[in-house]
Image (tube, rainbow, N blue to C red):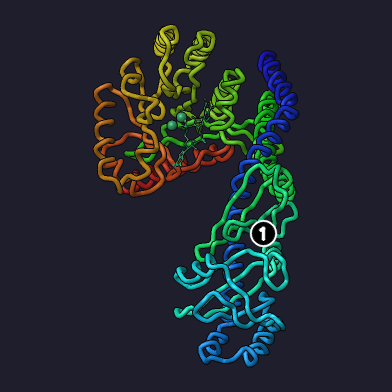
């Protein structure tokens, strides 16, 4: 007990020293995940904004073209500049983007404009060539305008006869458009029309640049991503960092709760026996020929004061790990013996089988203690049987111990049952190596009995094996009449399962025995009467 307590204290100590280190790991992990997230998403976001900027400029130009295309008809109709100019002025007034409009007719000479006093302006021949060769007869240029003497964007388009419209678009209109899209203080951008940067922004210290091209116009939007851009993006996504951190924290706390719960189980199991929290339940093992009770299996239950019922599959391995299993097994054997002492009539001719952990199979001290009990109480070996599962391979020294212990137990008249036969633990080798009284076939072979035809054959070969080794057979986990009927047909000797009864606390187990005894008495009375 002392060594188990010390082991537990050291484990708990380790657990308490962990949190700071775990916090640092979680924060670092959150930052790494956040950085990867931001890197990936910022790239996607900026690409999206760049494409959107190009698309919006193209839309604006498209809109401007459709707002002004009625002018083409007037050019074709050979209207004079005096007639045309007021309409051009009106169109400029209505347009969102065009601030001046000029028209040309088959040549690069603008013969009429919306600005009073200017009628003859030459379009650069290179620009005019671009219009002529463009599939949609349109282009952009960035040049100093003849009228305002300001660097401006020219949007020029024509029909197939090269009658067309030239419009001046102030650069700030497009800048405003992009600013509205990117909505980011720290994202520097520039617009390039043909070869000219129209803003010429200072973008010396950028980390990365991204270029987006228009398929229609000689137009590029360039983003310059600086440290500030990234920092501003990270700050705008700080909530993601918090989400990542809190998700990790929740997982960590959940895991930690489980670990602490386990540790607290470890601590409480050491006191559970003294606190009388363990109880032994008994599950009948029934003879299939006449349904009489041949014996029962003793199964431990732990009623934890705060955590409620804890299944043996959890606490038995825990007890084994903490070196506590021998005390628990002694408790089960004592409770079984107490049944015979206090209820000799009900228990007469019936055995109680007790599960023995692997560690105890190898323990000479445990075996010697049992043999001493057999000597002191000759009925002990008749009343108590041991259920043993082969739990993995034994080392050479373990094998020697097990052989010695089983031999001594057999000589003392103790019955040994092979538990969970067929599950991969209790295999053929194990069964052949030692002398066992009974083979307990695991419930997995019963679950689908009647639905999987090959199970019948598997059971038949197990029964043949048992017969050849002169072993009795108990089939576990029988829950339905259908399963029972098949097992009867196959000639199984003993049945254990919910069909007859679930494991019962001692008082109910005694009631069950009394009820069976009364029924047997009544049946034999009826038999005698009928004779
Ligand atoms: P086991 O030795 O194979 O015990 C049989 C298990 O099958 C029991 O579960 C029992 O309640 C359950 N069972 C019986 N009939 C049926 C049925 O018709 N249908 C179904 N679905 N289940 C049925 P339990 O009591 O939860 O025990 C689980 C395991 O814990 C036992 O398996 C045994 O390996 C271990 N255990 C229980 N008590 C002790 C003990 O005192 N010492 C040791 N070393 N192990 C024990
Ligand atoms: Ca068992
Ligand atoms: Ca079993």
Q: Residue 463: image x %, image y %?
A: 27, 31
Mark 1, ligand 1, within 8 Å: the answer is: no
Q: Residue 328: image x %, image y %?
A: 59, 23
Between 5 and 92, the one lying in front of the other is 92
Q: Is residue 373 visible?
A: yes
Q: Quadrant of the N terminus?
A: top right
Total labels: the figure holds: 1
Q: Is residue 177 visible?
A: no
- Rendered view: 234 above or below 276: below
Between 238 and 518, the one lying in front of the other is 238
Compared across the picture, whether 59 is left or right of 477 comes to right
Compared across the picture, whether 27 is left or right of 367 comes to right
- Rendered view: 195 above or below 321: below
Q: Residue at x 71, y 24 (%)?
A: 12
Q: Residue at x 52, y 34 (%)?
A: 282
Q: Residue at x 71, y 53 (%)?
A: 201
Compared across the picture, whether 497 is left or right of 372 comes to left
Between 395 and 86, the one lying in front of the other is 86
Q: Residue 94: image x %, image y %?
A: 68, 83
Q: Which residue is mark 1?
A: 198
Q: Quadrant of residue 315?
A: top right
């Amino acid at each position: 007990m002392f060594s188990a307590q010390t082991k537990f204290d050291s484990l708990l100590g380790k657990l308490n020293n962990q949190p700071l280190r775990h916090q640092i790991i979680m924060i670092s992990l959150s930052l790494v995940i956040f950085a990867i997230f931001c890197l990936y998403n910022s790239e996607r976001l900026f690409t999206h904004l760049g494409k959107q900027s190009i698309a919006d400029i193209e839309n604006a130009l498209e809109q401007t073209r459709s707002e002004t295309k009625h002018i083409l008809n007037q050019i074709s109709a050979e209207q004079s500049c005096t007639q045309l100019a007021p309409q051009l002025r009106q169109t400029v007034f209505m347009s969102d983007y065009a601030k001046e409009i000029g028209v040309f007719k088959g040549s690069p000479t603008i013969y009429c404009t919306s600005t009073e006093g200017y009628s003859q302006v030459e379009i650069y021949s290179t620009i005019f060539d671009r219009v002529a060769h463009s599939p949609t007869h349109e282009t952009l240029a960035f040049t100093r305008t003849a009228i305002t003497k300001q660097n401006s964007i020219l949007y020029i388009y024509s029909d197939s006869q090269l009658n067309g419209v030239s419009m001046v678009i102030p650069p700030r209109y497009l800048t405003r458009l992009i600013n509205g899209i990117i909505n980011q203080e720290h994202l520097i951008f520039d617009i390039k029309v043909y070869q000219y940067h129209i803003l010429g922004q200072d973008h010396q210290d950028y980390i990365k640049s991204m270029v987006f091209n228009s398929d229609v116009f000689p137009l590029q939007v360039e983003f310059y991503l600086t440290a500030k851009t990234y920092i501003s993006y990270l700050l705008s996504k700080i909530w993601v960092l918090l989400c990542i951190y809190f998700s990790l924290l929740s997982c960590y706390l959940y895991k930690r709760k489980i670990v602490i719960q386990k540790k607290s189980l470890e601590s409480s199991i050491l006191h559970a026996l003294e606190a009388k929290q363990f109880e032994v339940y008994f599950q009948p093992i029934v003879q299939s020929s006449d349904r009489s009770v041949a014996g029962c299996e003793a199964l431990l239950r732990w009623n934890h004061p705060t955590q409620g019922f804890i299944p043996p599959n959890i606490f038995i391995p825990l007890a084994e790990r903490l070196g506590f299993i021998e005390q628990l097994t002694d408790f089960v054997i004592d409770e079984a013996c107490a049944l015979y002492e206090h209820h000799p009539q009900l228990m007469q001719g019936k055995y109680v089988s007790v599960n023995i952990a692997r560690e105890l199979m190898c323990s000479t001290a445990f075996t010697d203690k049992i043999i001493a009990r057999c000597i002191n109480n000759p009925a002990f070996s008749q009343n108590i049987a041991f259920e043993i599962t082969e739990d993995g391979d034994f080392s050479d020294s373990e094998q020697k111990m097990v052989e010695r212990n089983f031999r001594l137990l057999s000589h003392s008249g103790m019955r040994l049952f092979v538990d969970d036969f067929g599950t991969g633990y209790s295999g053929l080798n194990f069964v052949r190596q030692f002398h066992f009284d009974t083979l307990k076939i695991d419930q997995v072979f019963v679950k689908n009995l009647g639905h999987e035809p090959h199970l019948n054959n598997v059971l038949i070969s197990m029964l043949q094996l048992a017969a050849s080794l002169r072993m009795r057979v108990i089939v576990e986990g029988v829950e339905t009449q259908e399963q029972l009927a098949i097992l009867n047909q196959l000639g199984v000797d003993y049945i254990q399962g919910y069909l007859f009864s679930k494991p019962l606390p001692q008082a109910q187990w005694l009631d069950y025995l009394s009820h069976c005894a009364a029924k047997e008495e009544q049946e034999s009375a009826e038999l005698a009467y009928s004779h």
